[in-house]
Amino acid sequence: MDLVGKAEISKSDRSQSRFFNTDAFARPARGTLGNAAKYNLRGPGINNVDMGLYKNVFVKERYRFQLRGETYNTFNHTQFDGLDLTARFDPAGKQANARFGQVISARNARRMQLALKFIF
């Protein structure tokens, strides 16, 4: 693949359907690999906060219960994961993959768990 322009676009211009400038890539000349480096793009970042809360309740000196509550992705931020980076060109050199440059997956939403543990 040939890199013919700047692939990065400003954060305000990014969307789920256009995460980078797809016009910056072109079909390489016949018989060549192209001039694009292996890592031209940086994917979506991670904004994740996990929390846990524990409470020990003593029954006797040696015995206790522990109540645990844990959340993963506590603030439930949408965290995009995968981009469609498959560039396919038709014989005329135009992009044939309609999803090229789109966000195609996201990480897990908020998860919560409760547990009761007996310690002796």
Image (cartoon, rainbow, N blue to C red):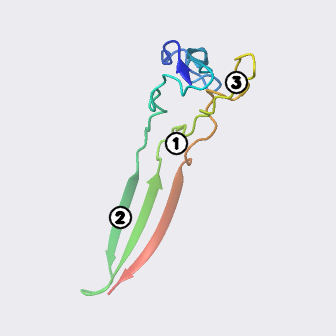
Circle 2 packing at 10 Å, graded few (<14), some (14-19), many (20+), is few
Vertical position of residue 33 compared to residue 114: above or below = above
| Rendered image quadrant of residue 54 | bottom left
Query: In the rendering, at what x and y percent does residue 73 appear?
Result: 47, 47
Residue shown at 54%/28% (left/top)?
33
Residue ID for mark 3: 89
Residue ID for mark 1: 76
Residue ID for mark 2: 54
Vertical position of residue 81 compared to residue 101: above or below = below
Query: In the rendering, at what x and y percent does residue 58 appear?
Result: 30, 79
The secondary structure type at the circle numbered 1 is loop
Disc assigned to residue 97: none
**The disc labelled 2 sits on which kind of residue?**
Tyr
Say which label, 3 or 2, has the lower sequence index: 2
- Looking at the picture, tell me which residue is in the foreground, 89 or 41: 89
Query: In the rendering, at what x and y percent does residue 110 appear?
Result: 53, 49
Residue shown at 24%/86% (left/top)?
61
